[in-house]
Amino acid sequence: MDLAPLFLTLGGLFLAGLVADVAARRTRLPRVTLLLAIGVAAGRSGFDLIPAGFDEIFGFLSIAALTLVAFLLGNALTLDKLRAHGRMILWVSWSVVAATLIVVTAGLWAIGLALPLAMILASIACATAPAAMQDILRETGIDSGFAETLRGIVAIDDAWGLIVFSLVLVAAAALSGANGHGLIALAVEDIAGAFAIGLAVGLPGAALTGRISRGEPLQAEALGLVFLTAGLCSWLGVSYLLAGLVAGAIIANFATHHERAFHEIEHVQWPFMLLFFLMAGAVLEVAQLWALGGVGVAYVVLRILARVIGGWTGGWLAGADPVERRWIGPALLPQAGVAVGMALVAAEQFPDWGPQIMSLTVGTTVAFEVIGPPITRLAVARVGVKP
């Protein structure tokens, strides 16, 4: 294998990512949007600068990046946070996921999409953007109960979303004519297996990490846990997103001998995410995206409507005050890596719909990364500092 094109491409992509990061800081455009745009320009729909065969490493990059994200999602599910805001977090997360699945499925089916495809896209719409949410809350500088609640909701609604996504894939396959009973068994095995791997990695990880360097986990420890989780899930064919989330939550709750169990994961996450978004843009079929224009607009409108309905309903059930009920749904609009990861899994399982799923998900992710963060900032500011 000629390594020169590989290293040249990696170097060029990292430098392009650096340019996107600087441009995002100066223009306040979302980094994810800029990375996807650069990927499109460099990929098959643009100048075709990516060497043949390089997209074969996209599978490795996507699994590594999204397992890192899943660990960080689990980090938000600590008992202290759930005790402080648990009622709100649980009611809103359940309500938002349910409203998104129902509203988006019904709307897309009504405009002519096949019901299985509408269900798949609706389950992908349940995902949010934990990394984007963390960046937005850090930028606002507001440390409030509402901000902590948003962090918890983003983490746990992605957990519910992943479970719903697994079940929807089974239902979609059954509606498409596959053996429903066998697929249900596979879905149960997938979810149970992911939980088992999360426990198998998380429990010893919680006991051992941070012992060598006085309470601070090392990069080797962090990457070892993440790659071990991803490898076991790939080997056994179960959800690395769900397993990473379970392992992350266990470490965050049981690694009491140090405070920042994910310090090093936070450090190493971004290079993987950078390459992931660049390559997601590079493999995007822009012609397919334009062909889905009307469906894309409907998807965006339906997801916004579902977030508003679900957030208000969940806030009402949790006893939140009227201001929080009004703003919590719009605050949950950002969408990024987890949704793209779900789309990759769905496109692999349903190859006939693969281009539609990937194009629609990536295109609408750009839309939600543009409109979502400003609305989240506005929501946090409007709710204000509440205990």
Image: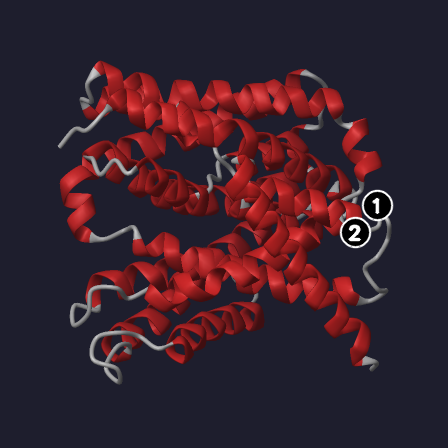
Position in image of residue 172 (x %, y %):
63, 39
Label 1: few (<14), some or many (≥20) within 10 Å? some
Instruction: Say whether residue 205 is left or right of residue 83.
Output: right
The C terminus lies in quadrant: top left
- Residue 177 in view of the camera: no
Q: Residue at x 36, y 46 (%)?
A: 155
Q: Is residue 313 above or below residue 276?
A: above
Instruction: Say whether residue 75 is left or right of residue 272.
Output: left
Work out how far the residue at label 1 is from the one at label 2, CA to CA, in angstroms: 6 Å
Question: In which quadrant of the rendered view does residue 17 lie?
Answer: bottom right
| Residue bearing the label numbered 2 | 42
Label 1 close to label 2 by CB (< 8 Å): yes
Q: Nearer the viewer, residue 36 or 362?
A: 36
Question: In which quadrant of the rendered view does residue 51 lie?
Answer: bottom right
Instruction: Say whether residue 254 is left or right of residue 222.
Output: left
Q: Could you tell me the amino acid type at mark 2?
A: Ala
